[in-house]
Amino acid sequence: MDLYEYQGKELFKRFGIPVSEGRLATTPEEARAAAEEIGGQVVVKAQVLTGGRGKAGGVKLAEDAADAEQKAADILGLDIRGHVVKKIWIEQASGIAKEYYLSITFDRGEKKPLFMLTTEGGVEIEEVADKNPDAISRLHVDPLEGFQPWQARRLIYGAGIDDPGEQKQILSIIGRLYEAFVQCDAMLCEVNPLIVTPGGEVRALDSKFTVDDNALYRHEDIAAMRDLDAYPPEERVAREKGVTYVKLDGDVGILGNGAGLVMSTLDVIALAGGRAANFCDLGGGGGAEGVVDALEVIASDPQVKSILFNIFGGITRCDEVARGILTALDRMQIDRPIVVRLDGTNAEEGRRLLEESDAPIDVEPTMLDAAKRAVELAAAA
Ligand code: GDP
Ligand code: MN
């Protein structure tokens, strides 16, 4: 789960990482009030779950409260890389002498958390990695040994930061960021820029904080930070109904039972020259309730042009799934063509049920035939 900048900063603050004082606002009037409370020059920052806000006009300095109201009006409603700005963060403006970059993430190859620090902050790290890779100081932390202060020192020297005041502050920030990363079960904690003010004070000016979805059950407070409005409608429905759902970028909606079967269905769709729009895993069950929920999720994705059911009956019997599909179609209107492949336990009975019904379903004998048909129907739509 990705957190908004203001939420990431709240966590930073909790772990003692210095951030600027700020307030959240959703209207220009609230922005004005927030700026009045903070006093002086403020920054008005779009809160969207994507980076590059500065370049897109989503970060603006304001001289006073009236100016903050104006800047807020400019930024609210802005579309930043497909994310419409509904919330803004008003923060005390910082003077910036230097912009550094600090992050910790997982290096899956090494199976260890990886710190990166560079004095070339403020721009995207990919750009630095591309043009000036030697400028990035990297360091892996052994999760069993844990983090040691000497590692932070090595990271800092590696980045070429030689001011003792900065070294001392960044040393402490690195240790705290590691704490935040581990204790919050984060996948990424990125500070870009980590600034040095003209007075020599080091502070996190931005935050990119991603928490492992699978660990959210033990972080109630972080789980509650999820903004349901920021997700497409079908993802919201899936979450509510507890349906395993993954969004992709093609146009065939996929329903299968079991992760392995669903994965191979994606391959077969590709083989047939198509692309999956998404997939739902019905898991072991194929009862009407599960099918209704999954169909509802799949069908609320506007990108779906055809729907493919790929069911292999094992413990789940195909006739049961067929009844589930028919009940689901009784209960809801699906305006896109449906292709079904049933095989395994009671497949014949299942196919007979579907073929004898007057539901608008194509029953295909094999997985490849079904995939070809679904791709054909999607292309024709
Ligand atoms: P991003 O573009 O989404 O990464 O948003 P950031 O929070 O990193 O802000 C983008 C840029 O705006 C920063 O790199 C800074 O140069 C600038 N900026 C943000 N906050 C302040 C501030 O308090 N004072 C000044 N002078 N510039 C700021
Ligand atoms: Mn940034």
Image (cartoon, rainbow, N blue to C red):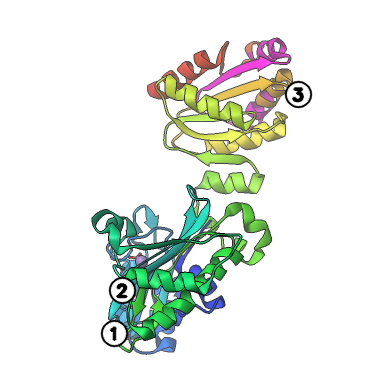
Question: Is the residue indicated by label 3 positioned so its CB lies within 8 Å of ligand 1?
Answer: no
Q: Which one is closest to the eye, mark 1 or mark 3?
A: 3
- x and y percent of residue 304 in the render? 47, 32
Give the structural element (helix, strand or loop) at label 3: loop
Residue that sits furthest to the left in the current view = 131
- The answer to which of 228 and 221 lies nearer the viewer is 221
Q: Is residue 130 visible?
A: yes
Q: Is residue 25 visible?
A: no
Question: Is the residue indicated by label 2 positioned so its CB lies within 8 Å of ligand 1?
Answer: yes
- x and y percent of residue 53 in the render? 33, 63
- The answer to which of 361 and 260 lies nearer the viewer is 260
Number of numbered labels in the structure image: 3
Judge whether residue 338 is colored magenta. Answer: yes
Corner quadrant of residue 261: top right
| Residue at the disc numbered 3 | 315
Q: Is residue 53 toward the left or the right of residue 171 in the image?
A: left
Between the residue at mark 1 and the residue at mark 3, the CA separation in whole angstroms equals 67 Å
Q: Which residues are magenta?
A: 326-354
- x and y percent of residue 51 in the render? 37, 60
Disc 2 or 1, which lies upstream in sequence?
1
Name which residue type carries label 3.
Ile
Give the structural element (helix, strand or loop) at label 1: loop
Between the residue at mark 3 and the residue at mark 2, the CA separation in whole angstroms equals 59 Å
Residue at x 54%, y 30% (from the top left corner): 263
| Residue at the disc numbered 2 | 99
Name which residue type carries label 1.
Glu
The label shown at residue 63 is 1
Q: Quadrant of ligand 2?
A: bottom left
